[in-house]
Amino acid sequence: MLKRAKVLIVDDDPLNRLVLEKTLQQDYDVFCVESGEKALTFLKTQSVDLLILDIVMPGIDGYEVLSKIKENTVTNMLPVIFISANSSHDDEAKGLELGAMDYITKPFSAAIVRARVRNQLLIKQKNDLLEMLASIDGLTEIPNRRYLDENLAREWRRCRRDQTPLSVLLMDVDHFKRFNDCYGHRAGDDCLKRIAHALVGACERGSDFVARYGGEEFAAVLPNTTATQAVAFANKLRHAVSNLGIPHTASLNSDHVTISIGIATTETGQVYAEQTLLEEADLGLYQAKDGGRDQVVSRLVNVSG
C-alpha cells in the first residue's frame, strides 16, 4: 500500500472490537466505535478507507448504516465488509445486495479477516488511482474541470453548513490566441504547463485548489477565504505568472505573459448554488479583461437561497 490505510470497526461487542483491532493494527490505522449512530457521526468528520460493520446492534443495525452510507455522496464509494454471527445465505445475500463488498461470519479467523481486508483495500487503491487519472488534465498535469466541479460542490456544501467564507477565482491568460499565432501551438502548450505549475506552486495551504478550467483558463477554489484574502492571493498568483518572464511580443498589454483574474466570494455560503460563484467570478474576469488585463476584479456574492 502506498499509504497506511484507515479502517473503522463498528461492533457493539467490546471483545470483538478488541480482537479485530489487534488483528489489523499492525498494518492499518484502526478506529473503533460501538454503534451505528456513532459510526455515522464519525464518518461526518473523518475519512476512512474501509468499514468493518456488525449487523445486529442496538439502535440502528448494520443494514441501515450501510443504506445511509450509500445514500451519502461523500461515503457511497466506501467499501464495507459485514461481519456477523448470522450465517444464513439470506443474510449474506441481503448484505451484498445492499452494497457490501464482503461478508464474514463469526466466529471469525484472524487470517481470513486480514486477507479479505487486504484484498478490499487493494481494489480500492486501484479504483482510487483510476479516479485520480480521470480527474487530471492531460496537458498540464493538474486537476481538470471535472475535478474542479466536484471540489467546488463539496466546499460549497461545507461553507453553507458552517457559514464560512468561500472564494472562487477564474484566470485567463491574456491574449493567448495571439501568443499561439506568434510562437506556435507547441510553445503555447509549454506556456500553459509553466503557468499551471506556477499557480499550484503558489498555493501554501493544503485546502487551496487550482485546476485547469479549459483552454487557457484556470480556476481556484479557496475555502475559508474572505474577499480581502482572496484578492491578496489572486495578486500572488498574478505575480507568480508574471515572474515567469515568458516573452509575449504579440500581447497588447505587456511584453511578457500575464493573466487576468476574476474573484467571487461568499462570506457566509448563502448563495443559490456553487455555479453562482463561477458565474460571478466569470463576470469579474470579464471586467478585469475589459479594464486593461493583468489585473484582479473581486465581486462579493451573498444571495439567500
Image: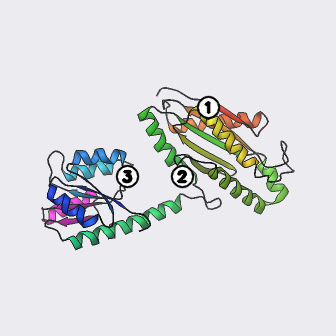
Residue at left offset 16%, top offset 44%: 59
Residue at left offset 25%, top offset 46%: 38
Mark 1: few/some/many CA within 10 Å (<14, 14-19, 20+): few
Callout 1–callout 2 Cβ contact below 8 Å: no
* In this view, 215 is above or below 26: above
Element class at badge 2: helix
Q: Which residues are drawn in magenta?
A: 80-107
Amino acid at circle 2? Arg
Residue 88 quadrant: bottom left
Place of residue 134 in the rendered image (x, y in percent of width and height, measured from the top left): 52, 60
Outermost right residue? 249
Mark 2: few/some/many CA within 10 Å (<14, 14-19, 20+): some
Place of residue 163 in the rendered image (x, y in percent of width and height, measured from the top left): 45, 31
Place of residue 220 in the rendered image (x, y in percent of width and height, measured from the top left): 59, 45
* In this view, 299 is above or below 130: above
Pointer 3: what residue? 47
Mark 3: few/some/many CA within 10 Å (<14, 14-19, 20+): some
The answer to which of 52 and 175 lies nearer the viewer is 52
Element class at badge 1: helix
Q: CA distance from mark 3 to mark 2?
A: 21 Å
Pointer 2: what residue? 146
Pointer 1: what residue? 228
Q: Is residue 98 magenta?
A: yes
